[in-house]
């Protein structure tokens, strides 16, 4: 998922654990450049061990590289959601997403029907998110996931937010869901719909392999339901759940507009 303003994504049940990890992580000094990153990793490894990260995850942490591209993207992130909803729709190809989303809904009717019966989430919003985030899987990113999320946990801009996701990524390496070589989007988002690692742990279903289409779509539906999506409530009644996915107002409006168009087809 687009990472923008995802500080709001942590549900109450997990907030205390995330806070504790973040507070401990502060013991390792953050940085604003590659200087100090290697020493920080050694210090952060102690936090990771205390949080239950084991051998493979610790090895991945110590092998992580300072992700210059991720930092560059992070510094310009707000530009991605500038302007009006029409501006965003044009930049992201909203009309093309609607057209392809309608085709995919028809071609995968059984899958989307099963998801809606189980989670109460219709095809339109899932296809809108899938299309907006990765172009239906065409652009899942080539940034090393562990390096990206670990770099953001080290960076002084928002270490309290990203440190728990770094811990989660290392746990996913331990479990085999990720490896030290796994790649994804610039901010460590994973798979077809762009989950941050902590949300993979909390809302991922089945194998948690977010590069698998059905797993990613079911996990996205599970996330939306957990954030208040009400079956049959329509888009305006469910904007809060979409806001859980991304708190940028123009993004929410674009998702609702695209989803309504797909569902209405």
Image (cartoon, grey):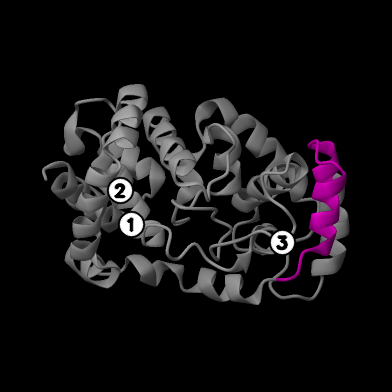
Task: Give the vertical position of 31 relative to 129 (above or below).
Answer: below
Residue on which the image places disc 2? 127
Q: What residue appears at the point 31 percent right and 23 percent down from the top-left corner?
A: 117
Q: Identify the image quadrant of the C terminus.
A: top left
Query: Is mark 1 in CB contact (under 8 Å) with mark 2?
Result: yes
Q: Which residues are magenta?
A: 47-66
Count how many numbered circles sit on residues in the image: 3
Asked if the magenta segment contains residue 62, the reply would be yes
Residue 150: percent from left, percent from top: 70, 59
Q: Which label is found at residue 181?
A: 3
**Which quadrant holds residue 34?**
bottom right
Label drawn at residue 232: none
Q: Residue at x 25, y 68 (%)?
A: 93
Q: Residue at x 16, y 45 (%)?
A: 260
> Does residue 84 appear in this view?
no
The reply to whether discs 1 and 3 touch (Cβ–Cβ < 8 Å) is no
- Residue at 70% in and 63% down: 147
Label ID, residue 131: 1
Secondary structure, magenta segment, majority class = helix
Of pointers 2 and 3, the one earlier in the residue sequence: 2
Mark 2–mark 3 contact, CB under 8 Å? no
**Residue 63 coordinates in the image, percent (x, y):** 82, 63
Let me know if residue 61 is in the magenta part. Answer: yes
Marks 2 and 3 sit apart, C-alpha to C-alpha, by: 28 Å
Q: Position of residue 137 (x, y in %)?
A: 43, 58
- Mark 2: secondary structure: helix
**How many neighbours does mark 3 have within 10 angstroms: few (below 14), some (14-19), or many (20 or more)?**
few
Q: Residues within 10 Å of mark 2 (few under 14, many from 20)?
A: many
Label 3 element class: loop
Towards the viewer: 217 or 8: 217
């Amino acid at each position: 998922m687009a990472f923008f303003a995802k500080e709001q994504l942590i549900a109450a049940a997990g907030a205390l654990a995330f806070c504790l990890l973040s507070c401990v992580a502060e013991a390792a000094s953050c940085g604003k450049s590659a200087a100090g990153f290697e020493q920080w990793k050694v210090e952060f490894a102690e936090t990771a061990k205390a949080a239950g990260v084991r051998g493979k995850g610790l090895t991945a942490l110590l092998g992580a590289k300072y992700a210059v591209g991720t930092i560059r993207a992070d510094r310009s992130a707000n530009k991605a959601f500038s302007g009006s909803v029409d501006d965003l729709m044009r930049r992201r190809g909203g009309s093309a997403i609607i057209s392809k989303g309608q085709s995919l809904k028809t071609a995968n009717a059984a899958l989307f029907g099963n998801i809606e019966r189980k989670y109460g989430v219709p095809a339109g919003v899932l296809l809108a998110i899938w299309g907006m985030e990765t172009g239906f899987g065409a652009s899942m990113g080539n940034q090393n996931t562990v390096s990206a999320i670990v770099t953001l946990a080290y960076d002084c801009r928002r270490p309290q937010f990203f440190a728990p996701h770094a811990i989660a990524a290392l746990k996913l390496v331990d479990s085999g869901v990720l490896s030290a070589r796994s790649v994804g989007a610039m901010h460590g988002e994973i798979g077809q719909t762009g989950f941050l690692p902590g949300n993979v742990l909390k809302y991922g279903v089945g194998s948690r392999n977010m590069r698998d289409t059905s797993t990613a779509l079911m996990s996205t539906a599970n996330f939306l339901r957990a954030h208040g999506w009400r079956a049959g409530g329509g888009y305006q009644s469910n904007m809060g759940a979409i806001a859980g996915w991304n708190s940028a107002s123009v993004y929410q409006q674009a998702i609702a507009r695209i989803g309504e168009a797909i569902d209405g087809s």
